Image (cartoon, helix red, strand yellow):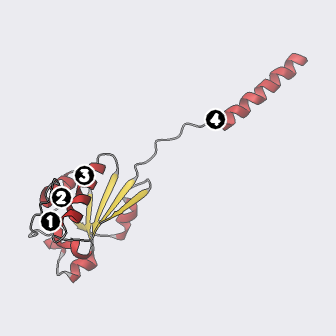
Amino acid sequence: MKNILSFLLAAILLSACNFNAPQESAEKPNDGIFIHITHDHSHPHRVLMPLSMAAMMANEKDVLIYLDIDAVKLVTKDAADIEYAHFASLKSSLTKLIEMNVGIYACPGCMKAAGISPDDLIEGVQVAQKDKFFNFTQGRILSLNY
């Protein structure tokens, strides 16, 4: 009888230890990086830095770029290119990001204020829709504002 009680006590202790053990979990979804750009050609560092960050992060994270205020002028077909310091140029950055399937969205209200129509946008840039802000990633969302 003593052996049976010892066995039961050991079984209870083992199950209690396993109850608190970390469980294997399903793979975590990618976190998302929401990059908000408001400046235009007059602030090249504030334009090219976030585009560079987006390209670096897009290899491992879900990335969405949102352009509003003056930044909508950057993504038109006739926009001038920008070069600054060691960063890739505006046009090469946008081309790379579009090839990487990074969502690039322009604010419709800011486009209207600037006299920009959806047909004026370069191929691959879309007019922003609020549902895209929440559905581009399944993980947490980090926001960077420039």
Q: CA distance from mark 3 to mark 2?
A: 9 Å
Q: Would you name the residue on which mark 1 appears?
A: 122
Q: Would you name the residue on which mark 3 appears?
A: 55
The image position of residue 101, as x and y in percent, is 25, 53
The image position of residue 109, as x and y in percent, is 27, 79
Q: Secondary structure at mark 1?
A: loop
Q: Nearer the viewer, mark 4 or mark 1?
A: 4
- Within 10 Å of disc 4 (Cα), the crowding (few <14, some 14-19, many 20+) is few
**Residue 94 got which mark?**
2
Q: CA distance from mark 4 to mark 3?
A: 39 Å
Dot 4 or dot 1, earlier in sequence: 4
Q: CA distance from mark 1 to mark 3?
A: 18 Å
Amino acid at pointer 1: Ile
Dot 2 or dot 4, earlier in sequence: 4
Q: Would you name the residue on which mark 4 appears?
A: 21
Q: Nearer the viewer, mark 1 or mark 2?
A: 2
- Where is 73 relative to 9, above or below? below
- Where is 129 relative to 139, above or below? below
Dot 1 or dot 3, earlier in sequence: 3
* Tag 1–tag 2 contact (CB < 8 Å): yes
Dot 1 or dot 2, earlier in sequence: 2
Q: Nearer the viewer, mark 1 or mark 3?
A: 3
Dot 4 or dot 3, earlier in sequence: 4
Amino acid at pointer 3: Ala
Locate residue 144 relative to residue 80 in the image: left or right: right
Q: Secondary structure at mark 2?
A: helix
Q: Residue at x 14, y 65 (%)?
A: 122
Q: CA distance from mark 2 to mark 4?
A: 47 Å
Nearest to the observer: residue 21 or residue 89: 89
